[in-house]
Image (cartoon, rainbow, N blue to C red):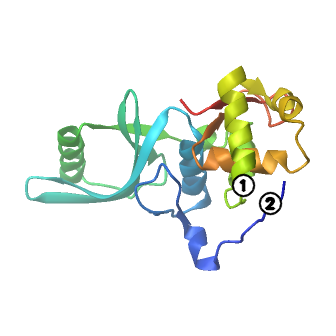
Amino acid sequence: MRTTQLRPARHQLNFVNANKCLTAIPVRSTLHRDALIQSVLDPHVRCIEFLNEVRFGTEAVTVNSIVIRRFDGAYMLDIVGHTAPRDVDEEQTLFNGLKSLGVSVLQLDSFDIRREPRLSSAREIWDHRNVDVPFRDRSSILSALSEYGPQSVNSLEDILRATPDFRPSLYALACADLVEIDIATRPLGPNTRVRARR
């Protein structure tokens, strides 16, 4: 299996773009980028969009945040300590505007975002987002997961008699929202669980 790693242009480093994102999403800091990448790889997240402002009536509040849509609802990510201060009127506009959109606030702090093994696993998988996975290899991986169900990385390698390039391809498929990889339970390794996208 041959893989090609493409390097993104330098100006693209401040944006995250993935199949789940409705548009390329700007990120202000490494912390915001990590939160966004973890959302991209979270199997519960179905769609991600950028929210520039929230309006209610004639008032508007700039938020420059992301909204993640999961099966249980839509949430605007609010990273504690990384939000511009708002006065009482702006907070009320934000509350009413989000409520009218059916969006709740999901507060995260730096500890939540930097929790291991999730942080390192998400970063490692995301580093392979531009790997070119040949159609034959993608088809083999997805067929094996469909036929045998969720597998450990090691078991999947055995089933496919995989080459050393297997893991970069698997990680690229996760970035493309075609497979789910458990990034929260244990560090990436032979026992990491993989399943076809539900």
Distance between the Cα atoms at labels 2 and 1? 6 Å
Residue 95 seen from this side: yes
| Residue at 45% across, 39% down | 46
22 or 162: nearer the viewer:
162
Mark 2 neighbour density, 10 Å: few (under 14) some (14–19) many (20 or more): some
Marks 1 and 2: in contact by CB < 8 Å? Answer: yes
Q: Which labelled disc corresponds to residue 19?
A: none
Chain-order first, disc 2 or disc 1: 2
Residue 182 seen from this side: no
Q: Which labelled disc corresponds to residue 3?
A: 2
180 or 63: nearer the viewer:
180
Question: Which amino acid type corresponds to the residue marked 2 in the rendered image?
Answer: Thr
* 164 vs 14: above or below: above
Secondary structure under tag 2 reads loop
Going by the image, does 75 lie left or right of 5? left
Mark 1 neighbour density, 10 Å: few (under 14) some (14–19) many (20 or more): many
Going by the image, does 44 lie left or right of 156? left
Question: Which amino acid type corresponds to the residue marked 1 in the rendered image?
Answer: Val
Residue annotated with mark 1? 133
Residue 174 appears at what percent x and percent y?
Answer: 65, 44
| Residue at 64% across, 77% down | 9
Indicate the quadrant where residue 4 lies: bottom right
Going by the image, does 78 lie left or right of 167? left
Number of numbered discs overlaid on the protein picture: 2
| Residue at 62% across, 49% down | 175
39 or 106: nearer the viewer:
39
